[in-house]
Image (tube, rainbow, N blue to C red):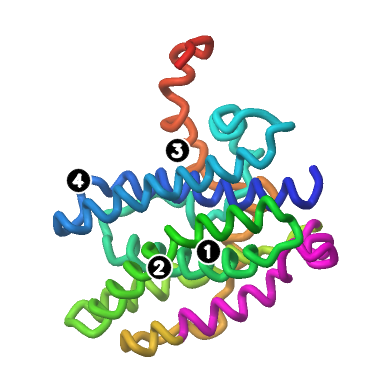
Amino acid sequence: MNAVHELLFRLADDDLVAGHRASEWTGLAPILEEDIAGASMAQDQIGHAQSYYELMPELGTPDALAFGRKATEFRNARMVEYANTEDYALRLVRHWLYDTAKAVRLKHLTRSSHEALARLAVRIGREHKYHLAHAETMITKLGQSPANERIQTALNQAFAEALALFEITPATEALVQTGVMPHENDLKNEWLENVGATARKAGLVLPENPDPTPHLGGRFGHHSEDLEQLIDEMTEVLRSDPQAVW
């Protein structure tokens, strides 16, 4: 797999899996407005994944790439695959941390030497800014409310997970040298500045020296059982009749 293909799979798989996890909150969010917003954002994320897959026609159709691979072939960060709990604070914090990282990446991808990816990043960025605005608004409001302690507890749990979004792979240097994307460490540092600014407004404190090690491996195809279970759910209809024409 070349460096650009690896990057595209990382981008697509992150959004595909994150979108499916977000969709699981439909009907379960604490207020109706959050139900509607969550469902809309989940749909957007899965659509973004499809667009990334479409940049690799030589490897297969978007359907084949999304639903025809084993868990070990996925390159998403482990953070997005973890099963949802009943804790909406954790769901919200993961949404905020992930979408802040995605916004940083998209900003730089709009200047990528890969022209098709740069154009796509501009289009996706127009939609994604609303996702990030939603996350930052909710985090700030709840952080400044009596729910502060719950949000802080969720942040303490999710922060190390989010650091693994910037896992370095053998493709990292090649992407930097060819101008496709900045180094993961540079993206991480910008992300830290952005989440730090929102955290301060919300009255939250970023955990010091969190260890992302338990959450690494996703970029290399090493995943939790949660992803295998999710892929089984995602592909249930396809597996019922693989030869069906839709």
Mark 4 = which residue?
27
Disc 3/disc 4 C-alpha distance (Å): 19 Å
Quadrant of the image containing the C terminus: top left
Specify whether residue 90 is painted magenta: no
Disc 3/disc 2 C-alpha distance (Å): 25 Å
Disc 4/disc 2 C-alpha distance (Å): 21 Å
The answer to whether marks 3 and 2 mark residues whose Cβ atoms lie closer than 8 Å is no
Of callouts 4 and 1, the N-terminal one: 4
Q: Is residue 101 left or right of residue 213?
A: left
Q: Is residue 115 left or right of residue 1?
A: left
Q: Is residue 42 above or below residue 130?
A: above
Where's residue 66, x and y in %?
Answer: 55, 34
Which quadrant of the view contains residue 158?
A: bottom left
The answer to whether marks 1 and 2 mark residues whose Cβ atoms lie closer than 8 Å is yes
Q: Is residue 239 above or below residue 137?
A: above
Name the mark nearer the viewer: 1 or 3: 1
Mark 1 = which residue?
102
Mark 3 = which residue?
230
Element type where label 2 sits in the image? helix
Q: Label 3 sits on what residue type?
A: Leu
Q: Label 4 sits on what residue type?
A: Gly
Name the mark nearer the viewer: 4 or 1: 1
Disc 1/disc 3 C-alpha distance (Å): 22 Å
Name the mark nearer the viewer: 3 or 2: 2
Of callouts 1 and 2, the N-terminal one: 1
Element type where label 1 sits in the image? helix
Where's residue 53, x and y in %?
Answer: 61, 40
Q: Name the residue rendered at 69%, 33% in the picture.
A: 57
Of callouts 3 and 4, the N-terminal one: 4
Q: Is residue 243 visible?
A: yes
